[in-house]
Amino acid sequence: METIFSGIQPSGTPTIGNYIGAIKQFINLQNDYKCYFCVVDEHAITVPQAPLELRQQTLSLAALYLAVGLNPKKATIFIQSEVSAHAEAAWIIQCNTTIGELERMTQFKDKSQKNGRTGVSAGLLTYPPLMVGDIVLYNANLVPVGDDQKQHLELTRDFVERFNKRYSQPNQEILTMPEVKIAEHGSRVMSLQEPTKKMSKSDPNKKAFISMLDEPDIIRKKIKSAVTDSTGIIEYDPENKPGISNLLSIFSAVTDFTIDDLVLKYNGQGYGVFKADLAEAIVDLLLPIQTRYNELLHSDELDVILDEGAQVARLVANKTLQRMKNGIGL
Ligand code: ADP
Ligand code: NA
């Protein structure tokens, strides 16, 4: 059976972008693959986090994983910092990656441009090796991510090839080569306020994203105020009409309608009707998830599931780490 690893940072409540691009796919994957779903809290600390909030968001994200339908009997669900092999592997990987490779990552360029190189942590630069570790430790063949992570996956593949070449014995590769698995639709959900920029849970403008825990009235308000254009024509044209095209992708991703279905259905109607229906579709999707989330967050069940998940994860991760260390001569 093929193996999947995927992680989300607890750097805020997941948005419908995270849901459409990543979490939604997980639910089907757990039936067909051996799955590891991780809350990557060590990634979150590459930028400053308030300690209590970080802890709370870590548990909250784990509860959300379960609330959307991830099943601990089928998948391993755990918190990254509870498996120390991640930090250890990241060091080994950093020592086999060049600074040049890391400085080329667009996510680093974007974030360091905003704050200046001297104002960002070294961890922001060495974040991709931590991510490489997440993937290789579980021998993942497939990594389901949004479009924004493609470059990091390329780096992972380059690393695996180089590491195996340098350190593996003939016919005994130390690391498994992963493939990237991008969602067909909605692999890049855009900001509701600046539809040329990706929707992100860490956007300081809260109107730019819908969080999975937003209340119905907030969802309605945010969709209503989503930036579109003045033509009032509902058509899918991401280049010239990024706002309405983004809303069409979201609508299609949260319902059984295709984008073509929606364009036909709303032909000749204004943005107002379309937006109102979209808001209700999102509310219908999120309400049951939120109810289950609230039950889980205050239960012992969550702690038990995470403890068991970490135990399983440690066994697998430590084995790979040991192979890496043996290969290198540590
Ligand atoms: P964020 O940028 O919201 O903090 P993360 O870096 O934690 O998101 O990414 C978690 C997962 O969600 C990754 O698989 C990523 O590809 C996916 N993802 C993040 N933002 C989007 C988006 N706007 N559209 C689709 N998928 C996304
Ligand atoms: Na759809």
Image (tube, rainbow, N blue to C red):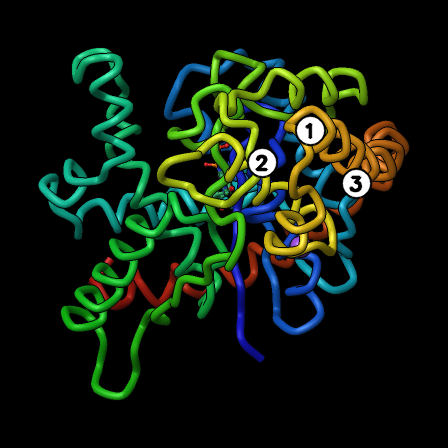
For residue 194, what is the image quadrant?
top left
Distance in Å between CA atoms under marks 3 and 1: 15 Å
From the top left corner, tell me how far across and down residue 253 is, in percent: 64, 49
Q: Residue at x 43, y 46 (%)?
A: 86
> Residue 275, labelled with which disc?
1
Q: Is residue 77 visible?
A: no
Mark linked to residue 243: none
Residue at horizontal 38 percent and vertical 67 percent from the top: 178
- Mark-to-mark CA distance, 3 and 2: 15 Å
Say if residue 262 shows up in the picture. yes
Q: Considering only vertical position in the picture, is 247 above or below 27?
A: above
The mark nearer the N terminus, 3 or 2, is 2
Residue type marked 1: Lys
Image marks 3 and 1: residues in contact by CB distance under 8 Å = no
Q: Is residue 23 above or below residue 170?
A: above
Classify mark 1: helix, strand or loop: helix
Query: As displayed, is residue 246 above or below residue 204?
Result: below
Up-down relation of residue 50 to residue 191 (above or below): above
Q: Amino acid at mark 2?
A: Leu
Foreground residue, 190 or 182? 190
Tag on residue 285?
3
Q: Which of pointers 2 and 1 lies earlier in the amino acid sequence? A: 2
Q: Position of residue 26 (x, y in %)?
A: 64, 56
> CA gap, disc 2 to disc 1?
8 Å
Q: Which residue is mark 2?
A: 247
Q: Nearer the viewer, residue 168 or 3?
A: 3
